[in-house]
C-alpha cells in the first residue's frame, strides 16, 4: 500500500515527466482530462497484467443455503475484478466453529463464525463445465454410465455457482473464495459533477484563504493507494500521453524504459510472479528389484 496521489498532483507529475516543466490545469480543462483518460487506460492494462497479490482479497460469499433441488448461486460484488486463479486456488466450503448459532436472514457470516483450517476444497472449473455432463463408462464397481458427482465451482458472468445441487452436509458450510479487487479509476469531471455543496454548481472562485469555494467533491480523493509504486502509473501515462505531443516525441522511449523498470521491480517484489506457488517434497523409499 502507498499514500497515493491526488489527481491534481498526478497530472502535474505526468506533465513534468513529459515536458520537464511545471504546469497548472483546472479539473475541467481538456489537457487535465486527457491525462486522466490515459491514466485509466494504463490502470486497465496493469489490472489485467497478472494476479497481483496486493489486489488479492478473501471474500466470504455466505452460507450455502438454497431451495431444495436448485443449485446454490452467489453474486460477486462490483468491486471484484475476477476470481483469483493462481496455482491451487479454489472455492472453500468452511465448517462452522463449535457453538456457533445457525445463521439467519439478518446475520451475515464472518471469519468469527467458521473454522479457517477445516474446509472442503472445490476446484474452479470452466464455464462450459456447467453444461457438460461427465460420465464414467465403467466405475470402480463396474457400473456403466455413472455420472461424475465431484463438486466444482463455476463462474458465469458475476455469478459463482456449482455443477450440481449441494448435499445436506455441504449446505451447512460457508463458502469463501479469493478474488482480485478492481483498481479504482480516476474520476473525470463533467457537467454532472457536484461540488462539496451539491445544491450549487462547481465554481472556481476563491475565498479569502485561497481555497475553492465549491470544488468537485472528488478532486481531493487520493488515488493509486493500492499500487505499491504509483510512479509506474505516472511514467506509463506520460509515455502514452507524449505520443500525442510532437515536441515530446523524443521523450517516449525514455519514459517507456522508466515505466518498464518500475514494472519489473513490482513483479520481483510480488511473490506470485517470482516464486513457486508450492514446493513438492518426496521421501525416497525402498526400490523393488525383479
Image (spheres, rainbow, N blue to C red):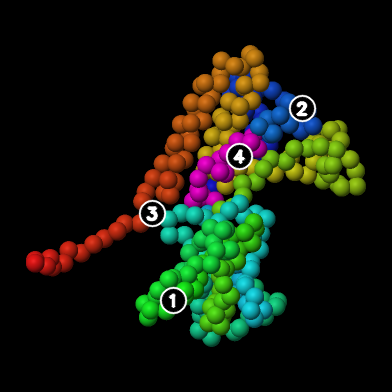
Q: What kind of element bears circle 3?
A: loop
Q: Residue at x 86, y 33 (%)?
A: 205
- The vertical placement of 82 against 161, above or below, is above
Which numbered disc flags the more N-terminal residue, 2 or 3?
2
Judge by depth and name the residue closer to the eye, 137 or 204. 137
- Distance from Cα at disc 3 to Cα at disc 1: 39 Å
The residues bearing labels 2 and 4 have C-alpha atoms spaced at a distance of: 20 Å
User: Which quadrant, please, contains the C terminus?
Assistant: bottom left
Give the crowd class for mark 2: few <14, some 14-19, many >=20 residues within 10 Å: few
> Which residue, given by chain and number where applicable, does mark 2 sit on?
30
User: Is residue 53 covered in magenta?
Assistant: yes
In primary-sequence order, the first of circles 2 and 4 is 2
**Start and end of the magenta stretch?**
39-55
Determine whether the residue tagged by mark 2 lies in a helix, strand or loop: helix
Disc with the residue nearer the chain's start (1 vs 2): 2
Which SS type dominates the magenta stretch?
A: helix
Q: Earlier in the sequence, mark 4 or mark 1?
A: 4
Residue linked to disc 4: 43
Question: Residue 101 magenta-drawn?
Answer: no
The residue that mark 3 highlights is 277
Q: Is residue 178 visible?
A: no
The 10 Å Cα crowd at callout 3, few under 14, some 14 to 19, many 20 or more, is few
Query: What is the number of the mark on residue 144?
Result: 1
Mark 3 or mark 1, which has the lower sequence index? 1
In percent of width and height, residue 25 lies at 74, 27
Which label lies toward us, 2 or 4?
Answer: 4
Q: Is residue 173 visible?
A: yes
Specify the farthest residue to the top. 247
Instruction: Please say if 286 is above or below 50.
Output: below
For the view shown, which residue lies furthest in the right direction? 199
Q: Give the CA separation, mark 4 to mark 1.
A: 52 Å
Q: Nearer the viewer, residue 238 or 161?
A: 161
Amino acid at each position: 500500500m502507498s499514500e497515493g496521489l491526488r489527481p491534481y498532483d498526478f497530472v502535474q507529475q505526468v506533465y513534468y515527466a513529459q515536458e520537464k516543466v511545471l504546469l497548472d490545469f483546472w479539473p475541467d480543462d481538456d489537457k487535465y482530462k486527457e491525462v486522466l483518460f490515459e491514466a485509466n487506460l494504463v490502470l486497465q492494462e496493469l489490472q489485467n497484467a497478472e494476479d497481483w497479490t496486493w489486489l488479492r482479497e478473501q471474500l466470504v460469499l455466505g452460507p450455502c443455503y438454497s431451495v431444495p433441488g436448485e443449485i446454490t448461486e452467489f453474486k460477486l460484488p462490483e468491486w471484484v475484478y475476477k476470481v483469483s486463479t493462481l496455482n491451487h486456488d479454489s472455492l472453500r466450503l468452511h465448517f462452522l466453529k463449535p457453538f456457533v448459532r445457525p445463521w439467519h436472514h439478518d446475520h451475515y457470516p464472518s471469519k468469527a463464525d467458521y473454522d479457517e483450517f477445516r474446509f472442503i476444497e472445490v476446484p474452479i472449473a470452466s464455464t462450459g463445465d456447467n453444461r457438460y455432463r461427465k460420465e464414467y463408462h465403467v466405475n470402480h464397481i463396474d457400473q456403466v454410465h455413472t455420472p461424475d458427482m465431484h463438486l466444482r465451482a463455476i463462474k458465469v458472468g458475476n455469478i459463482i455457482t456449482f455443477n450440481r445441487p449441494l448435499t445436506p452436509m455441504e449446505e451447512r458450510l460457508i463458502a469463501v473464495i479469493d478474488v482480485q479487487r478492481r483498481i479504482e479509476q480516476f474520476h473525470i469531471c463533467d457537467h454532472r459533477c457536484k461540488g462539496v455543496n451539491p445544491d450549487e454548481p462547481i465554481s472556481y472562485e476563491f475565498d479569502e484563504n485561497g481555497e475553492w469555494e465549491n470544488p468537485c467533491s472528488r478532486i481531493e480523493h487520493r488515488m493509486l493507494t493500492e499500487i505499491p509504486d504509483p510512479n509506474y502509473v505516472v511514467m506509463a501515462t506520460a509515455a502514452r500521453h507524449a505520443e500525442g505531443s510532437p515536441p515530446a516525441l523524443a521523450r517516449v522511449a525514455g519514459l517507456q524504459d522508466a515505466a518498464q523498470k518500475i514494472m519489473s521491480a513490482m513483479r520481483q517484489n510480488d511473490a506470485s510472479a517470482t516464486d513457486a506457488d508450492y514446493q513438492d517434497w518426496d521421501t525416497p523409499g525402498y526400490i523393488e528389484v525383479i
